Image: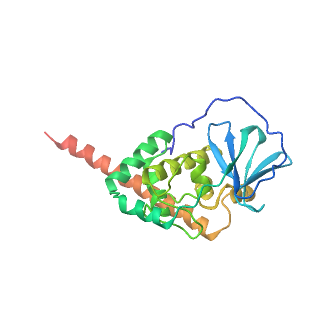
Amino acid sequence: MRIRTYLRHATGTLALLAAASVATPAHAGERISLRNGFDMRCDHHAQVGAEMRLYTTSGNRDYIVLRPEEITSVELVPDLPAQSSGASSKTLADTHLTAADLHEMLTAAGQEHNIDVDLLASVVKAESNGNAHAVSRAGARGLMQLMPLTAAGMGVNDSFKPDQNVRGGAAYLDWLLARYHDNLGLALAAYNAGPGPVDRYHGIPPFHETRVYVARVIHEYNRRVRARQANASAALTLSHASP
């Protein structure tokens, strides 16, 4: 069973980025517009040889590798202001997320990005276990545990709002699946550890946490698919048995 039946490709004018690096002012990041229609945010970028590196932090350790022709423009943007604890508490108090609500959001996001809803549900389970206000030690937020820069790049204004978080997480997973040619293991590894380590190791990086994460999501996804198929088979048998 295929996870997706197509990859979305946006049309656009091919453009080359002609800068080797851009000095980044304090408390600012960069918005990178891509030829496939997505925007990404990074701390800074630099061209190294034939590849363009988008650095996700202020240092030069964690980065995403792109081809220069994949990038159409670079714009300096200020970082998003940190959310106060009061704002988060208010959002938590105002949110009443049921299993049915979550399934509806996941279904809508899955249809928009042509990703199996059971895969999205498996990612949510591994990331937050359905807690819309989960926050990791690294600062990832919400149901699909979006880092602030990733969330901003996917158009998410408030990661603690379940509908925004699910849409942003699905869009990011869609982008990763396209980047890694529908290789689910690599896409999930990049979702967990970032594309930088996946690109550096040319595969799932040898991080215990990442390998356990990939196995956990795929196991849960397979379980859900088997359950769905069993339910469909039982329903078909019942319909044939009815007078």
Q: Is residue 73 left or right of 162 when viewed as pictured?
A: right
The structure's colour scheme is: rainbow
Q: Is residue 34 left or right of 169 when viewed as pictured?
A: right
8 up-or-down from 116: above or below: above
Foreground residue, 160 or 87?
A: 87
- List x then y, in percent, for residue 193: 63, 61
- List x then y, in percent, for residue 112: 47, 39
Foreground residue, 215 or 75?
A: 75
Question: From this viewpoint, is residue 150 visible?
Answer: yes
153 up-or-down from 211: above or below: above
Foreground residue, 176 or 232?
A: 176
Q: Is residue 20 left or right of 79 when viewed as pictured?
A: right
Q: Quadrant of residue 129?
A: bottom left
Residue that appears at 61% across and 48% down: 153
- List x then y, in percent, for residue 224: 40, 55
Residue that appears at 70% across and 58% down: 27
- List x then y, in percent, for residue 185: 59, 55
Question: From this viewpoint, is residue 180 visible?
Answer: no
Quick one: which residue is furthest to the left in this view?
Answer: 243
Q: Quadrant of residue 211?
A: bottom right
Residue that appears at 45% across and 61% down: 125
User: Exactly how many numbered labels are in the figure?
Assistant: 0
118 up-or-down from 129: above or below: above
For the C terminus, the quadrant is top left
Residue that appears at 32% across and 57% down: 98
